[in-house]
């Protein structure tokens, strides 16, 4: 069983508290300050859920006692009907035949949700059930959504928004073309490990479609006051980590994807890592010093720390 060591929250908590204090001081104190939005990006299997759980508990418990809401980009996926419609409208694009890539999230819902949280208005946070429709997934009934900022509840002052593509920013079309051509060049070289690049497998127009959809995510990304990036020293670790997760799931429940299915599943996400991770690594926030990048080794232990 894979062991995920929490060596990350001791680094992240002081980073968050320092930026939160600066945010509160700039807005007249803790009471009058608007909610503090934290984006949290991590490749699949890196230990993102463990970190989010620890951050939420630490910030909620004394001595900080902060009202915290945790949101996942996974809960903003399109409804099953809308995802089916998207896939049918783009039948030759394998990247949008299932949930995952930018373009498969309900950004209208996301904008409404973030606007309400920013203004400390009552709102219901959606929930998504990945098991529906034989694993294709669907949004859950509104009656199951999580109430936030309701009467009798403390107003949320810290929002943690986590997800595998949170913080990704679109490239120019020319930048996508350059990366695509470089992928083809590397793939065609003799004695090269072609698994290190996957962009060559896709049509250019399919990559440009996802890139264009990602521009619509800026309205969310630009609202972040701080950003935490759990990066892998080698992005290919994601395949091993996902294989470990599914193996454990099969042992515990008797259900889960086969190794072949896992590799195919990750293949659908990997192009976004290749396209957009470099830009995130350089920093995506306007205010310098508000992005934390933790680079982890294959055993998920932090090996490098960068404040950007």
Image: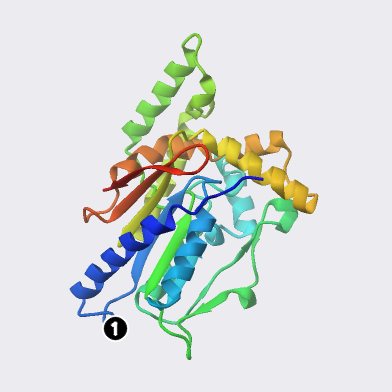
| Residue 72 place in picture, x, y as percent | 51, 61
| Residue 142 place in picture, x, y as percent | 61, 74
In this rendering, the answer to whether 88 lies above or below 10 is above
Which residue is situated farthest in the right direction here? Answer: 254
Name the image quarter holding the N terminus: top right
Q: Is residue 136 left or right of residue 45?
A: right
Q: Is residue 53 left or right of residue 177?
A: right
Q: Quadrant of residue 157?
A: bottom left
Of 108 and 65, which appears nearest the observer? 65
Q: Is residue 303 at all visible to an observer of this figure?
A: yes
Residue ID for mark 1: 31
Residue at point 35%, 38% (across, down): 278
In this rendering, the answer to whether 21 lies above or below 258 is below
In terms of secondary structure, where does tag 1 sit?
A: loop
Residue at point 61%, 42% (across, down): 242
| Residue 253 place in picture, x, y as percent | 78, 53
| Residue 189 place in picture, x, y as percent | 46, 11
Residue at point 39%, 47% (across, down): 168
Q: Is residue 92 at all visible to an observer of this figure?
A: no
């Amino acid at each position: 069983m894979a062991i995920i060591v929490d060596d990350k929250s001791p680094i992240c908590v002081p980073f968050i508290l320092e930026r939160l204090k600066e945010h509160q001081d700039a807005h007249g104190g803790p009471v009058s300050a608007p909610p503090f939005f934290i984006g949290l990006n991590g490749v699949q299997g890196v230990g993102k859920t463990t970190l989010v759980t620890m951050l939420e508990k630490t910030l909620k418990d004394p001595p900080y006692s902060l009202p915290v809401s945790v949101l996942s980009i996974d809960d903003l996926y399109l409804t099953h009907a809308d995802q089916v419609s998207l896939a049918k409208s783009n039948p030759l694009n394998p990247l949008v035949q299932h949930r995952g890539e930018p373009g498969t999230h309900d950004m209208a819902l996301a904008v409404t949700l973030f606007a309400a949280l920013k203004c400390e208005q009552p709102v219901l946070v959606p929930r998504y059930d990945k098991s529906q429709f034989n694993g294709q997934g669907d949004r859950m009934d509104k009656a199951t959504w999580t109430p936030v900022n309701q009467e009798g509840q403390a107003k949320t002052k810290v929002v943690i928004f986590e997800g595998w593509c949170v913080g990704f920013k679109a490239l120019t079309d020319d930048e996508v073309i350059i990366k695509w051509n470089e992928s083809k060049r590397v793939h065609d070289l003799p004695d090269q490990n072609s698994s290190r690049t996957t962009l060559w497998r896709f049509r250019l127009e399919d990559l440009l479609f996802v890139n264009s959809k990602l521009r619509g995510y800026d309205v969310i990304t630009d609202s972040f006051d701080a950003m935490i990036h759990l990066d892998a020293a080698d992005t290919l670790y994601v395949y091993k980590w996902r294989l470990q997760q599914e193996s454990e799931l099969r042992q515990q429940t008797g259900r889960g994807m086969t190794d072949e299915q896992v590799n195919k599943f990750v293949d659908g996400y990997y192009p976004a890592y290749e396209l957009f991770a470099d830009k995130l690594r350089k920093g995506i926030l306007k205010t310098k010093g508000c992005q934390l990048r933790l680079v982890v080794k294959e055993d998920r232990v932090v090996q490098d720390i960068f404040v950007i």
